[in-house]
Amino acid sequence: MNKKRIAGFISVSIASSLLLSGCQLLTGYQQIDGAESADKWAGKIEPIAGEVNIACSGTYHCEIMQIDQTSVIAPDTHKPVDPKMLSVVNTDDEIVDRTKNVLFVPLKNQHSVKVVPLSESGIAGMTNYYARVKPAKREVHINFYPENNMGYVERFAMIHEFVEPDTYLLRAYRKKPSQDTGSLLDTASPNPLCIDLIQNNSIKRQFCKQVNNESQGEFVETNVINQIKQSTQTAQTKTKV
């Protein structure tokens, strides 16, 4: 019996090339590539040997608020809690030169967290950062802003084994219903917000916001990966027959 695991949350571009059928991406980050001042940011995630990059996308704005016990982005200023966390040098008024070896400040230990200003947000005046950490089991808290204002925020949290040095993307989108019931209630309600954990263009985990009484509006982990594998195995079996 498959068990659903609940990811902690309270209601409140990296443009991924992976598009899923039945999924509707939020459009906020489509504006990033055309931002006039985007050259002040790193512009893309730079992999570093032996490190894990954690990023978010899909909504107008998103912020990595906390990793384990370390606060990352301040909820009031929407900037790094500690300026020393910034791992990119001289990005205020100069174009980042990725050819220089001084671009990134090295991680000192397993508890170190560094942030890189990635790109201009879909919300004016905001910056999208990604985080650099050492491989380990981590608890990550992220705020997603599905609308073009800071008044509506969805808070998401998850625990994951980031054991492989790689880039991990938490991408938000709205999932289309599998069938149209014709219900006025369903028509009036927005499609549920879902969040995929993507590594190497592969969905590792998926969480969708539930509105039933049992889940009380929490993000619940789905069995989408298992379903995909089962569908693939079924198709292979039918082919052999």
Image: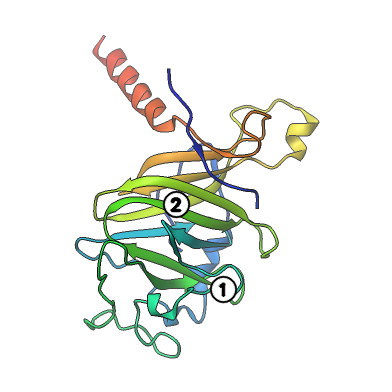
Q: 10 Å neighbourhood of mark 2: few (<14), some, or many (≥20)? A: many
Q: Amino acid at mark 2?
A: Leu
Residue 236 appears in which quarter of the rendering? Answer: top left
Residue 163 falls left or right of residue 84: left
Residue 124, horizontal then vertical, whole percent: 61, 74
Badge number at residue 170: 2
Q: Nearer the viewer, residue 40 or 105?
A: 105
Residue 100 position (above or below residue 61):
below
What residue sits 49% from the left and 37% below the top?
A: 21
| Residue 6 horizontal/vertical position (percent) | 51, 36
Say which residue label 1 marks.
126
The one nearer the camera, 4 or 67, is 67
Q: Residue 240: x percent and y percent? A: 24, 13
User: Which residue in the rendered view is the most extreme toward the right?
Assistant: 184
Above or below, 70 against 184 in this view is: below
Cβ–Cβ below 8 Å for labels 1 and 2? no
Residue 149 position, x and y percent, is 68, 65
Q: Residue furthest top?
A: 241
Q: Calculate the distance from the C-alpha at mark 1 to the C-alpha at mark 2.
A: 18 Å
**Tag 1, which secondary structure?**
loop
Q: Which residue is at a point 58% across and 52% down the rendered structure image?
A: 155
Q: Which residue occupies 65% across, 49% down?
A: 11
Q: Secondary structure at mark 2?
A: strand
